[in-house]
Image (spheres, rainbow, N blue to C red):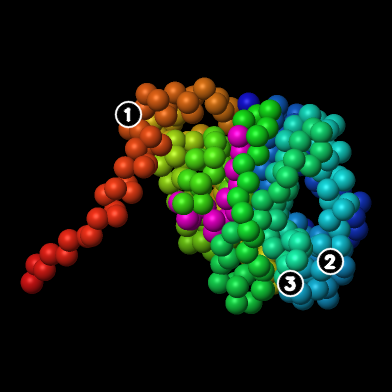
Amino acid sequence: MKIAACAYPLDFLPNWTAYAAKLTDWVSRAADQGADLLVFPEYGAMELASLGGADVAADLEAALVEVMRQSDAVHELHCALAAQHKLHILGASGPAMAPHAARPVNRATLYGPNGVIGHQDKQIMTRFEREDWDIAPGHGLQVFDTALGKIGVIICYDAEFPLLARALVDAGAEILLAPSCTETLAGYTRVKVGAMARALENQCITVHAPTVGAADWCPAVDANTGAAAIYGPPDLGFPETGILAQTDLNQPGWAMADISLDAIARVRREGAVLNHAHWCEQEKRTTAPVTRINGA
């Protein structure tokens, strides 16, 4: 299959028609290059706040409400594009109300040619999400068993916590999608390092799709730094750097790579190292007391 990771700029949109045209263009360009799975970034949906006008987009709470107001139309558009091009799309994440929740979660939805496959809510909130925006953590991880393989989603900060990814891999995931939205180079680097480490330790593919560029009309996503990339384990059958494809920093566009599930199975079976198989050996070496040696 061919996977496409999006480095996506956020635009102030005059109306729904402009958003639909933008998304259609992005999807069509990836489809024309043979992509089977498209990954859009975390909080890419926040550009829909502009449909409520400048005052709404500039208000943290009002922006959330406006984006959620567009959710049915967003689902309909993504379903239509996935069906038209016969591909899978992880849509840009955005706020959604989970059942019985008092506050919005940060949700990414996976679409296939036959419609909505499911969604993944972000599990661990950043300081901004906790302290300023009041975004709620999701509950539970999902593995999507698709025609392309078994897929898990680790949204931005989640990619920095290895046990989340490992739970998905233990449940069968071969491909981990890591949409992100990071303001600084340091923030982007944290997610990049996390995504690359998850590919290494699980001997799987990780797909990093960030927002890029300025969006000073929306304080929640006003500055965005990143490069889209597709990573694998730096081992048998994969590049020695672990980087299968990567865009230039802060440049909008698609990073694309051909991926083989057979290559994942082979490196897990025959690699120079067998991180995936040896993961469980950590437990018996960490449950015993750690010896402290005083070198003074």
Q: Give the mark toward the camera: 3 or 2.
A: 3
At label 2, the amino acid type is: Glu
Which structural element holds mark 3?
Answer: loop
Image vertical order of residue 135 relative to residue 107, above or below: below
Q: Which residue is mark 2?
A: 66
In this rendering, position of residue 45 left or right of residue 201: right
Instruction: Point out residue 255 in the picture as x, y percentages from the top left corner.
Output: 61, 39
Kindly indicate whether the residue at mark 3 contacts the one at mark 1 (C-beta within 8 angstroms): no
Instruction: Point out residue 283 in the picture as x, y percentages from the top left corner.
Output: 33, 49
At label 3, the amino acid type is: Ala
Q: Give the mark toward the camera: 1 or 3.
A: 3
Q: Which residue is mark 3?
A: 102
Residue 270 in magenta stretch: no
Kindly indicate whether the residue at mark 2 contacts the one at mark 1 (C-beta within 8 angstroms): no
Which structural element holds mark 1?
Answer: loop
The Cα atoms of the two marked residues, 1 and 3, are separated by: 49 Å
The Cα atoms of the two marked residues, 1 and 2, are separated by: 51 Å
Q: Is residue 211 visible?
A: no
Q: Quadrant of residue 278?
A: top left
Which quadrant: the C terminus?
A: bottom left
Q: Which one is in front, 222 or 120?
A: 120
Instruction: Point out residue 292 in the picture as x, y percentages from the top left corner.
Output: 16, 65
Q: Which residue is mark 1?
A: 272
Find the magenta span and give its range.
150-162
In this rendering, position of residue 273 left or right of residue 123: left
Q: Which one is in front, 248 or 87?
A: 87
Name the residue: 58% across, 65% down. 125
Q: Which one is in front, 1 or 278?
A: 278
